[in-house]
Amino acid sequence: MERNFKKDVKSLDDVFAFLDEEMGELRISPEAAYAINLAVEELFTNMVKYGVGSVDDISLSLTREKNRLTIQLVDHGVGMFDPMSADEIDTSIPLEQRKIGGLGIHLVRNMVDDIQYSYADGCSTITVIKNLEH
């Protein structure tokens, strides 16, 4: 299941509606759906903010294979921006001593089972894997 969304944070309502419909059909648990919604919101927003060079739509797809859900976001016609290259956040440091940025990606990394970035032919692709309960 794949759909394209306008590259704008205002598209998030449509993104969530698509995710809700598709995850309902795929019988995704509410706990897994929460993690997926959070991850997609963060990654989509990063593509809107940092995917410089294009106003093309962002493609979003979901595929379920047994107890594994694969979510893929593709930003077309952009320069390379790998959100996964951000440093790990040290949550033991007091808030006032932390540098700004990276907390969203930190949350995504901790809510999904795998996340990968690739770039080819002007397409920035993020693939997220979420293992589902039996």
Image (spheres, helix red, strand yellow):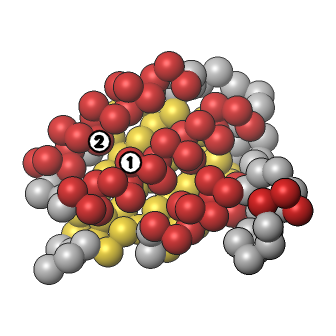
* Amino acid on which disc 1 is placed: Asn
**Vertical relation: 103 (above or below) 124:** below
Mark 1 Cα-neighbour bin, 10 Å: few <14, some 14–19, many ≥20? some
The answer to whether mark 1 and mark 2 are in CB contact below 8 A is yes
Seen in the image, is 72 located left or right of residue 95?
left
Q: Which residue is mark 1?
A: 37
Tell which tag, 1 or 2, sits nearer the viewer: 1
Q: Nearer the viewer, residue 94 or 59?
A: 94
Q: Nearer the viewer, residue 98 or 32?
A: 98
Give me the disc on residue 19: 2
**Vertical relation: 49 (above or below) 107:** above
Give me the disc on residue 58: none
Mark 2 Cα-neighbour bin, 10 Å: few <14, some 14–19, many ≥20? many
Q: Which residue sits at x=56%, y=22%?
A: 8
Q: Which residue sits at x=46%, y=67%?
A: 111
Seen in the image, is 119 located left or right of residue 3?
right
CA distance separating discs 1 and 2: 7 Å
Can you tell which quarter of the image residue 84 is in?
bottom right
Counting residues from the start of the chain, the first of labels 1 and 2 encountered is 2
In which quadrant will I find the C terminus? bottom left
Q: Which residue sits at x=74%, y=37%?
A: 50
Q: Nearer the viewer, residue 91 or 44?
A: 91
Q: Which residue sits at x=78%, y=60%?
A: 95
* Amino acid on which disc 2 is placed: Leu
Q: For mark 1, give the secondary structure.
A: helix
Residue 55 position within the rendered picture, expressed as x and y whole percent measured from the top left: 64, 21
